[in-house]
Image: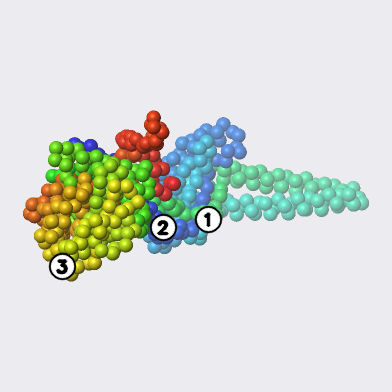
């Protein structure tokens, strides 16, 4: 199992960071918008008491209370079974079956008490209240209390009627007794007094018998009550509460899906992208020595990218010096005096590479001549800000002209330039002419090294025509853009032309590569300031790797 190139994936993340942020954010926003809003939910609670009132203090009442607590779980289970819930559905004519109703009902014994709570949750306050109360009624109907009530209902009604009649007689007797007391106080004769006293004694005895009968009937009703009866002590009252909602579920899910889609897209794009990302890619794919890698040089105009002259101690300048050193190592026994620099397609930076390489060659003490043989889209005069008045085409079309008349001095010592001149109608024929061969031979005698800027290989044949007339060809590849197939096709064209491909340069590398250039400055004994490049394999900091943290 190969090692995972973490830096590669970090670079991919930095390249597509905007997509990694935007897509999950949009998906999360969509998830938030489509999140269903919670519907209003209403809850109703009915409370039942099992057995005698806890206010009774007799031993029998305490025993009954303990038993009622044990029965609470039984009644709680009964309340959720079909006989009770089906009775509720039938009575209230609900548009649901008892299994659906069961999901909205919760029954629990209140710990440490004789109470049983029936909780119903629905989307309607009236429905929740009616269902809770009806469950209590159905539970009472199916309990022993309900069954005995049905058997003794008429007997209890008769006893209650007798109690009401006795109550009326007792009240009437007491009123008559008060009237007799008044007559006793106003009696005038002994006979009247005796008569009233006898009436009072008789009435008091009759009231006493009525009260005794009343007490016996009340005692009968109390004894006839089932000890473990169910009583509704609190009818249902519906209350509203917020519905269950998970406001972050859809946004989180949407963001996760968006992130997965983005990562999949990035992985697919990376798999389909056959461009060269690093020097390792070049070494694996091409049978050529990699001379170096140059970072993307900022600047719109050509002259703004001549970093080897304008910023000598920048990482890009050091990269060009490394290319110069590698060229020297490759040709120790047989130095290459004439080198052509080309690429597969326009826009890969071959002219900028050639110009900066010419500058570092001259800075190293080599007498260098840069020749603009791109007779279709010349750029050397713009890079060095030299007027394109005369040049290669003039030397080829006017044999009487001396080379020295077309050599342009630059601000760099040991560096001269021959511009393109007038763009001819037949560039390939001029480059393939005998006069061009003679010109190149004479230039080799005038300089230590001659660098030729040529058109790209694939669009035209100019580079192939010129490639076998130089000692070596350097091929420039733009990082993360130039396709492998095109590079191999261009190199195949050069090899068929019998060109000597000596190396390849990876250009416009995003954020440079893994290496970072460090410079220390010191003063030599003669007082001149020199720069020493110390290339160390040191990872970049997080702030340097992530541009938007700067």
Q: In this view, does 483 lie to the left or right of 521?
A: left
Judged from the image, the secondary structure of the residue bearing numbered disc 2 is helix
**Cα separation between marks 2 and 1:** 30 Å
Judged from the image, the secondary structure of the residue bearing numbered disc 1 is strand
Q: Name the residue under label 2.
A: 29
What mark, if any, has residue 240 been given in the picture? 1
Q: Marks 1 and 3: which is nearer the front?
A: 3
Q: Residue at 28% across / 49% down in the picture?
A: 415
Which mark is first along the chain, 1 or 2? Answer: 2
Query: Could you say which is closer to the camera, residue 33 or residue 312?
Result: 312
| Residue 190 spot, x, y in % from top left | 90, 48
Query: Could you say which is closer to the camera, residue 326 or residue 245?
Result: 326
**Cα separation between marks 1 and 3:** 90 Å
Judged from the image, the secondary structure of the residue bearing numbered disc 3 is loop
Q: Residue at 78% across / 45% down in the picture?
A: 201
- Farthest residue toward the top? 525
Q: Is residue 156 left or right of residue 183?
A: left
Q: Quadrant of residue 524?
A: top left
Q: In this view, does 386 lie to the left or right of 32?
A: left
Q: Marks 2 and 3: which is nearer the front?
A: 3
* 168 lies above or below 54: below
Q: Mark 3 points at which residue?
A: 426
| Residue 341 spot, x, y in % from top left | 20, 52
Q: Marks 2 and 1: which is nearer the front?
A: 2
**Cα separation between marks 2 and 3:** 61 Å
């Amino acid at each position: 199992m190969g090692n995972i190139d973490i830096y590669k994936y970090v670079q991919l993340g930095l390249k597509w960071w905007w997509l990694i942020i935007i897509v999950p954010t949009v998906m999360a926003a969509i998830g938030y918008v489509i999140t269903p809003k919670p519907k209003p939910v209403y809850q109703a609670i009915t409370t039942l008491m099992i057995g005698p009132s806890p206010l009774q203090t007799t031993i029998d009442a305490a025993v009954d209370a303990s038993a009622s607590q044990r029965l609470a779980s039984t009644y709680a289970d009964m309340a959720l079974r079909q006989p009770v819930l089906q009775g509720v559905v039938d009575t209230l004519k609900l548009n649901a079956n008892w299994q659906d109703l069961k999901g909205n009902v919760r029954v629990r014994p209140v710990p440490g008490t004789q109470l049983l709570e029936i909780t119903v949750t629905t989307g309607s306050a009236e429905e929740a209240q009616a269902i809770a109360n009806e469950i209590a009624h159905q539970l009472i109907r199916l309990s022993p209390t309900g069954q005995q009530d049905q058997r003794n209902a008429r007997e209890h009604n008769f006893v209650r009627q007798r109690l009401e009649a006795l109550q009326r007689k007792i009240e009437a007797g007491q009123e008559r007794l008060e009237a007799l007391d008044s007559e006793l106080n106003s009696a005038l004769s002994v006979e009247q007094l005796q008569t009233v006293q006898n009436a009072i004694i008789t009435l008091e005895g009759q009231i006493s018998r009525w009260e005794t009968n009343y007490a016996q009937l009340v005692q009968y009703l109390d004894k006839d009550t089932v000890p473990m009866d169910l009583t509704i002590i609190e009818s249902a009252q519906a209350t509203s509460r917020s519905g269950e909602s998970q406001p972050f579920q859809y946004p989180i899910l949407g963001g996760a899906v968006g992130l997965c889609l983005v990562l999949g897209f990035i992985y697919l794009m990376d798999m389909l992208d056959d461009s060269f990302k690093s020097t390792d890619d070049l070494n694996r794919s091409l049978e050529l020595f990699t001379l170096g890698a140059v970072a993307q040089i900022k600047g719109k105009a050509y002259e703004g990218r001549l970093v080897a002259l304008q910023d000598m101690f920048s990482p890009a300048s050091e990269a060009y010096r490394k290319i110069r050193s590698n060229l020297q190592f490759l040709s120790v026994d047989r130095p290459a005096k004439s080198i052509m620099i080309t690429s597969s397609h326009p826009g890969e930076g071959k002219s900028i590479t050639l110009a900066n390489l010419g500058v570092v060659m001259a800075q190293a003490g080599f007498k260098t001549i840069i020749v603009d043989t791109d007779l279709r889209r010349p750029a050397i005069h713009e890079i060095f800000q030299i007027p394109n008045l005369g040049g290669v085409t003039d030397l080829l079309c006017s044999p009487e002209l001396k080379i020295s008349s077309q050599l342009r001095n630059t601000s760099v010592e040991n560096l001269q330039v021959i511009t393109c001149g007038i763009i001819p109608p037949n560039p390939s024929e001029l480059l393939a002419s005998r006069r061009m061969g003679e010109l190149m031979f004479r230039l080799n005698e005038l300089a230590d090294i001659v660098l030729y800027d040529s058109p790209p290989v694939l669009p035209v044949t100019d580079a192939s025509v010129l490639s076998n007339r130089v000692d070596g060809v350097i091929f420039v590849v733009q990082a993360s853009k130039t396709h492998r197939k095109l590079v191999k096709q261009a190199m195949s064209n050069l090899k068929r032309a019998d060109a000597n491909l000596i190396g390849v340069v990876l250009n416009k590398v995003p954020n440079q590569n893994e290496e970072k250039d460090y410079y220390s400055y010191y003063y030599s004994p003669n007082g001149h300031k020199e720069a020493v490049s110390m290339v160390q394999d040191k990872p970049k900091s997080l702030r340097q790797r992530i541009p938007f943290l700067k």
